[in-house]
Each structure stands twice: as structure tokens, then as C-alpha cells.
Amino acid sequence: MEGQSHTGVEPTSPKAVLRLTFSYQGDEVALDSHRLVEMTVPPSHPVEEYRGGPGDWFEVLDAGGGVLYGQRLYRPIKTHHEVFAPDGSASWIAQDTVEGAFEVVAPLPPGATTVVVMSSPSADPSQPAREIARVQVREVLR
């Protein structure tokens, strides 16, 4: 894993965020790189509303597993692509190979220890989301 934790941004800065880049091939997800940057992120989504259900999101957790921040993701693992007909209508076609990358921009509120990415199975997006990636904040900030 490649990473650049020391970019002059202090992890304790109120605007410190981890930019995490993940790659995937099929159902295998790996953290490719990380970078500590300073930026403003949108407010947290109320993850309690969709925990246990289908969808895609990430959570920033404290040491006890409490959610400090959550944000929805839009289909981080792409299994289909959009195709347009000459008449302008669109349809979705399954990809021959499922591989690509996605990014998560996770804030680091006080007490943040873990970033977890949740996603419904690509074969059946109506199923409850499951954990597809977990990053320990302390390990990437070394």
C-alpha cells in the first residue's frame, strides 16, 4: 500500500480528512493509497436510518464502535455501465469484468479510530450492506 500521511496537515486539525483510495476486482477490495488533507466535508448522514439495510456508505467509528460520522456512497463498485441508444434512451449493461477504484474522504473527529466501508452485494443490491473494507486510522497515520 502506498501512502502519504505526512503532507503538513496535522491529524488534530478540525479540517483534517483522510482521502482513501480503494481498488476492487470482483468482490475483492483493497486500500491502494491514503493521504491526509485539509478540507471541509459535508455534514454526516444519519447512518442509523440505513444501518442493517441495503445501500453503500462509509462510517468513521470510535474505539467502542460508535459512529462519529457517516456518508452515503453512490455505487462504489461498478458492475454495470450506461449505454445510450440513437433515440436517446438509456439502459444498463453488465460489465464483462468488475474492476475499478473509488475514493472515500473521511473526516477525523476526536476519537476516530476506524473507517468502515459498507456495500450491498453487487449480485443483489437489494440485500443488506456488508463490510467491504476497514481501515485503522492509527495505522495509516504512522
Image (tube, rainbow, N blue to C red):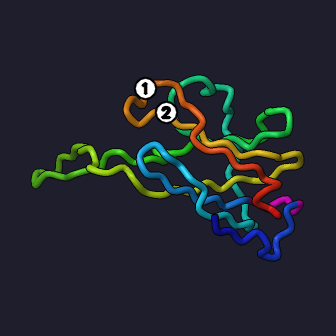
Residue 64 picture quarter: top right
- The foreground one among 56 and 63 is 63
Question: Which element is circle 2 on?
Answer: loop
Q: Which residue is outermost to the bottom?
A: 8
Where is residue 70? Give x, y as percent: 68, 41
**Residue at position x 59%, y 40% in the image:** 57
Most foreground residue, 22 or 88: 22
Quadrant where the image shows the N terminus: bottom right
Q: Is 53 drawn above or below residue 56 in the view shown?
A: above
Q: Which residue is mark 1?
A: 126
The structure residue drawn at horizontal position 31% and vertical position 46%, both measured from the top left corner, is: 80
Name the image quarter holding residue 114: top right
Q: Amino acid at mark 1?
A: Ser
The reply to whether callout 2 and callout 1 are in contact (CB within 8 Å) is yes
54 w.r.t. 111: above or below: above
* Residue 65 can be seen, yes or no: yes
Q: Nearer the viewer, residue 30 or 17?
A: 30
The residue carrying pointer 1 sits among few (fewer than 14), some (14 to 19) or many (20 or more) residues within 10 Å by Cα, namely few
Residue 106 point in image, percent of width and height: 70, 53
Q: Residue furthest left?
A: 86
Number of callouts: 2
Q: Which one is in front, 94 or 39?
A: 94
The quadrant in which the C terminus is found is: bottom right
Query: Quick check: is 37 in the magenta stretch?
Result: no
Residue that numbered label 2 is attached to: 120
Image: magenta residue range: 12-17
What's the amino acid at mark 2?
Ser
Of marks 2 and 1, which one's residue comes earlier in the chain? 2
Q: Is residue 14 above or below residue 54?
A: below
Residue at x 43% of width, y 26% of height: 126
Report whether 128 appears left or right of 82. right
List x then y, in percent, for residue 45. Answer: 66, 38
